[in-house]
Image (cartoon, rainbow, N blue to C red):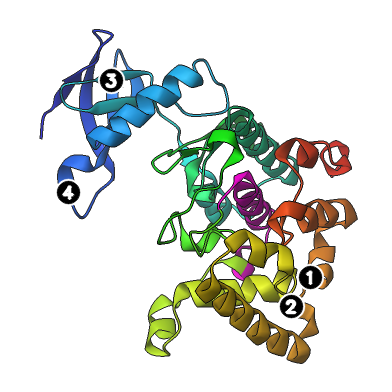
Amino acid sequence: MMSTVAGASGRVYRQGEVLRRDPADDKLSIFKAESDNKPFVFKRVSRPFYNLSQRLATEFAGSRHLRMHVDCNQEEAILVYPYFRDTLLGLIKNDSEFLVDERKKILRRVAEAIQELHSKDWIHIDVKPDNVLVNWTCDREGNKIVTDVALSDFDIAFKSENGQPRQTPYAIGNAMWRSPEGQTGRGVTKASDIFSFGLVCIYTLGGAELLLIDDYQDLVKSGITPEQEILTRHFSYFGPVNEGLLQQVNDEDWRVALTGASRMADMAVKERPEMRFELWGESLGPQAQDMISRVTNMDPSARPTIGQALAHPWWQEDD
């Protein structure tokens, strides 16, 4: 592996520690880099993603909400990004005392990032806490104060021409944070990003234990796929399958599967009514619960746009 990379700008980057190692191809690992005593990240990518990134960087030049590359090496298909010290996933996991106002600040920046994407008909498809990058500093009391937030990782982003949904023979994105239609790969639209954003809100505001699955191997041993478990949980939390979701998916096999998962969820809720978000979400406060209830509606057509979500009174509420 090379020790330095020359960017198209003429800047030279010196390779540092590995930030994320790709088990399939070490050349595609992500590295911290330095140039003129400033930290950066560089990443060698596939040629299709390199081309996609160039298109995105052109459309969203100067964005404050989306982490676009700031330099590149066309010959080596290397992209250079600004460096962020943390992800939302790590920040919440490692600091249970992280201030609520700062959590809310991050969520608003994420919503604004999604709004910027959606304004040009792009769908992110992989909105999740580890794709939210955060810079922060500390105040005199040692509290973390957020200084910068960006939504990253556009590997599977999709340009929706004329509002057409993305249809794939398989689910894409991270199973833990997908919308119900996203679990099927059918009918993925901007509304799918909205649902994922709702899950990110729940995680950020303290609901990690309700979303994260740590016992993948135990599930597999029991003959349950993670996708099945997550779908059943979501139906338990946010309500049964409805006609709007079934019409959006528009695939008979998946309709049967979704209906079956919803039926299992109904059985679980009869034994444990407290599984419904309308009950456990009360701890978030009425305005937060109302906003999240709207964006996690199981009917994609009934979810608000991201602009409507940003107009919700919760954002103006003092915590």
Q: Quadrant of residue 310?
A: top right
Q: Which mark is residue 280?
A: 1
Q: Secondary structure at mark 1?
A: helix
Give the Cα separation between the discs numbered 2 and 4.
41 Å
Give the mark nearest the N terminus, 3 or 4. Answer: 4
Give the Cα separation between the discs numbered 3 and 2.
48 Å
Residue identified by numbered label 4: 25
Residue in view at x 77 percent, y 74 percent: 276
Return the x and y of residue 85 as percentages of the image width and height. Answer: 45, 35
Amino acid carrying label 1: it is: Trp
Tell whether label 3 touches label 1 (CB within 8 Å): no
Indicate the quadrant containing the C terminus: top left, top right, bottom left or bottom right. top right
Give the Cα separation between the discs numbered 4 and 1.
43 Å
Residue identified by numbered label 2: 275
Residue identified by numbered label 3: 72
Amino acid carrying label 4: it is: Asp
Q: Secondary structure at mark 4?
A: loop
In the image, residue 77 lies in the stretch drawn in magenta:
no
Give the Cα separation between the discs numbered 3 and 4.
20 Å
Segment tinted magenta in the rendering: 188-210
Tell whether label 4 touches label 2 (CB within 8 Å): no
Give the Cα separation between the discs numbered 1 and 3.
47 Å
Tell whether label 2 touches label 3 (CB within 8 Å): no
